[in-house]
Amino acid sequence: MKYLIALSILMTTPAFASNTNLADVKEGKLQAVESMWLQDLEKGLNPKQQKAMALISLVATKMNNASDENRREEAEYAHVGFTARFQDIREERAELANKEIKLDYAGIQNYSKRLDSLIGDLQSFLK
């Protein structure tokens, strides 16, 4: 987003407008700005993955520290489910990276929503 703002400010300056061809800006520079913006969005997924891993670790700790057998089984079941959901998300991203497929905006939003949902579920379980 910051790249789009910077480009719009840059395009409004007289020196930029007089020295560049508008077609060049539309073709190359906007694609470059969009590519950088998507890369920044994709990098934003990494902290969410780390948070999900930390919360899954807390579920494992809860499972190991449970004094009641029923609570232990419940925590174990939740841990397996959360881990499977997390692995599914992570493996899909890794598979796309191996194929060198760049995520588009919709793909990044999809992963972000899935991670947010997982984090929300983990937090609800831990309360």
Image (spheres, rainbow, N blue to C red):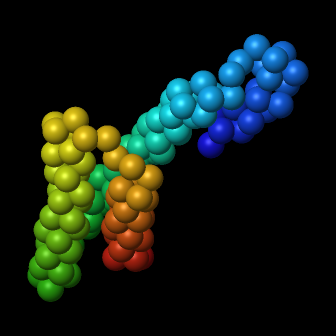
Which one is in front, 18 or 49? 18
Q: Is residue 96 above or below residue 117?
A: above
Q: Residue at x 20, y 74 (%)?
A: 78
Which one is in front, 53 or 21? 21
Q: Residue at x 17, y 51 (%)?
A: 91
Residue 63 located left or right of residue 124:
left
Residue 19 visible in the displayed image: yes
Residue 34 located left or right of residue 61:
right
| Residue 108, position as x, y percentages in the image | 39, 53
| Residue 22, position as x, y percentages in the image | 68, 28
Q: Residue at x 16, y 37 (%)?
A: 98
Residue 34 located left or right of residue 1:
left
Which quadrant would residue 43 be assigned to in this image? Answer: top left
Q: Is residue 88 above or below residue 45?
A: below
Which quadrant would residue 83 be assigned to in this image? Answer: bottom left
| Residue 19, position as x, y percentages in the image | 76, 14
> Total marks drawn?
0
Q: Is residue 54 above or below residue 12?
A: below
| Residue 115, position as x, y percentages in the image | 36, 61
Residue extending farthest bottom: 70
Task: Tell me the quarter of the image containing the C terminus.
Answer: bottom left
Which one is in front, 42 or 101? 101
Q: Residue at x 62, y 43 (%)?
A: 1
Residue 68 visible in the displayed image: no
